[in-house]
Amino acid sequence: MPSLPAAPEHPVAPLRRYVTSLCLEDPSVSLIRSSRTCKRLANICVPTLFHTIKYTEQRGQIVHLLDYLVITGRFVKHLKLECDWADRRTLLEIVKRCSNLRSLTVINYGHMLDSPDLPAAIMLLPDLTELRLMGPMDHSNSIHRSTMLEQLLGSHGDKLRSLTISGLARLGKAFFASLSRDARRLVELEFRDIGILPRSLPESTTWACAGHLQSLTFIRCDRLYANVFTKMLASGVFGHPQKVSLSDFDTYQGVRKLSDWDPDDILPRPPAHREWTIPTLDTLEFDFLATWEMESLQLVHTKKVFLSRVTETREKIIQQLAHKTSFPELVELHVTTDWNDQDFIELQRVCSARGVRKIMRDWPLACLGR
């Protein structure tokens, strides 16, 4: 396909309907699609409102987008960049020209944190409230990249409402100290595929976002232990989140490390009695947990439980859930669709006897681990 024509000297008539998404899966694509309109990017100018740009570099090509973002960039509110080891300078220029971003997602972002350029560009976005840095577990320059994130949180943390980080192998005390101190207005916090250095989580200090946090997610987080997390949750360190989602504690790439502890790790121990100091959660989701982890998490006060894979027999799980001390405020229970009829009927019987009003077999398998 030929290259894009030069931008017009005069704006064309406004689109009849706002373009809601610009998705460049293939760099040769030069068209914007909306429900009623299909026009070349070069012919779309002010006052068109862009909600989303998705940029994906493929086959080593670079999208010739920068000239048009001089005109349209200030209208972009949601930007998604899929790096794939693309030209770092081009990606940074795209971010800089979208100066009014509210949401930024960077996929395969790791090498973008090897220099201070990306954090510096993000710091210049006054309206940014949602940041998602997504990638596979990567040990390269992990300490330096963690430092870059600390600087970003220190300068921009009070503006963020939603933060997702995945793929960093070494997050230590300095990062979590900055997160718990500077990200004061977080409503949603999610970690996936990260490594937490021993004794890095501030276990007894209430996080600054405690008054706002509504959703908290930890998935495949190495050296995050269920007993420690339950203690932090019960004591109000995270405030009163409405929804908590947990999967694959203390694992790395699916390999459980219960017999291969680092000497500096906080070893798993039987759950101690913890006084529950916060209001009852609305929802607790957990998937792929060991037996002792289930013993810790059943102390959580929550109205709804979504239960997936646990390394325990169904009979044992039913026996635990039969006691009112297991999730004391439980009124609604959802299990995965692979429960057989006999076990599920018994589960319904014992849970109904303790006052659980709704027991459903409707949760997809591995729904959190995806």
Image: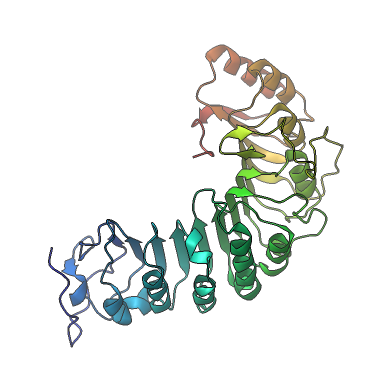
Q: Is residue 328 visible?
A: no
Q: Is residue 197 left or right of residue 118?
A: right
Please name the colour scheme applied to the rendered image. Answer: rainbow
Can residue 308 be seen here?
A: yes
Query: As drawn, is 295 to the left or to the right of 145?
Result: right
Q: Residue furthest left?
A: 2
Residue 352 location (% of width, % of height)? 67, 23
Along the viewing direction, whichever of 179 and 160 lies nearer the viewer: 179
Residue placed furthest toward the bottom: 9
Question: Is 203 located above or below residue 275 in the figure?
Answer: below
Q: Residue 1 at x, y = what percent?
A: 13, 63
Say which residue appears at 31% left-offset and 64% top-offset. Answer: 20
Q: State the residue lying farthest toward the top.
A: 342
133 or 128, nearer to the observer: 133
Residue sitting at x 54%, y 76%: 123
Q: Is residue 314 above or below residue 64?
A: above
Question: Looking at the image, which is closer to me, 84 or 26?
Answer: 84
Q: Is residue 132 left or right of residue 79?
A: right
Q: Nearer the viewer, residue 63 or 79?
A: 63
Residue at left offset 75%, top offset 54% = 200
List x then y, in percent, for residue 109.
Answer: 47, 60
In the picture, residue 145 is in which quadrant?
Answer: bottom right
- Identity of the residue drawn at 28% across and 69% down: 18
Q: Position of residue 68 (x, y in %)?
A: 27, 77
Question: How many numbered marks does the figure carry?
Answer: 0
